[in-house]
Image: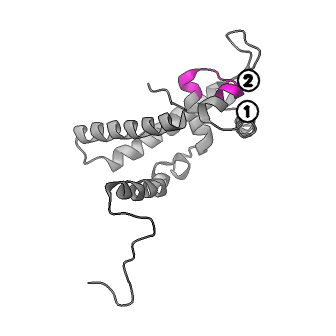
Amino acid sequence: MEKPGRRKNKPAGRTEKPVGRVEFETMLLGRHSHLFNPRTRSSGGRLDRSAYILLSRIQMDGPMSIGQLTEAFGLDASTLNRQTAAMMRSGLVERIPDPDGGMARKFRISAEGARLLDADRSEYVQGLEKVMDSWSAQDVETFAGFLQRFNSDIETLEGHPWPRP
């Protein structure tokens, strides 16, 4: 029974179509991200979101220049310069000459950056395992497939594909 004085209003722009449900559920997923954030867990994860994402990309592609990072992320060079400078100050990356002999220097993950990335990733996986503990292996596989498809379609529209392992 509905409480007096409370009305259920449908938010503006929300539809009864399934895509409206996707909008709502992706909004909630962003809200719940703190459950998987190692920085809020007792183990003391240390990477902020941007460092986690940048380090993950460099780990997959190998050393990358600012130009390559700009192309990969679709961000401007000044934003990436600030982020990589902060990561250098924290000892997460180091600048090296281009291993392929190019002019631009590249960023490579430091041993400490790799250690923290691996530790934080492990914490994220543990958090997800807790959430999906009652799911069947098939349900987890199906969900992973749909997430990959969803992300790949976004990447295609944006023109910035992400490498997959």
Q: Quadrant of the N terminus?
A: bottom left
Image check: 26 left or right of 90?
left
* Residue underneath mark 2: 95
Mark 1 crowd level (few <14, some 14–19, many ≥20, 10 Å Cα) = some
* Residue underneath mark 1: 88
The x, y position of residue 150, in whole percent, is 40, 40
Q: Residue at x 24, y 38 (%)?
A: 137
Looking at the image, is 68 positioned above or below residue 4? above
Q: Quadrant of the C terminus?
A: top left
The x, y position of residue 155, in whole percent, is 49, 36
Visible in this render: residue 46? no
- Residue 4's disc is none
**Camera-side residue of 48 and 67:** 67
Q: Which segment did they paint magenta? A: 58-69
**Magenta stretch: residue 56 in it?**
no
Image check: 42 left or right of 93?
left
**Camera-side residue of 18 and 32:** 18
Asked where in the image residue 24 lies, by quadrant, the reply is bottom left
Residue type at mark 1 is Met
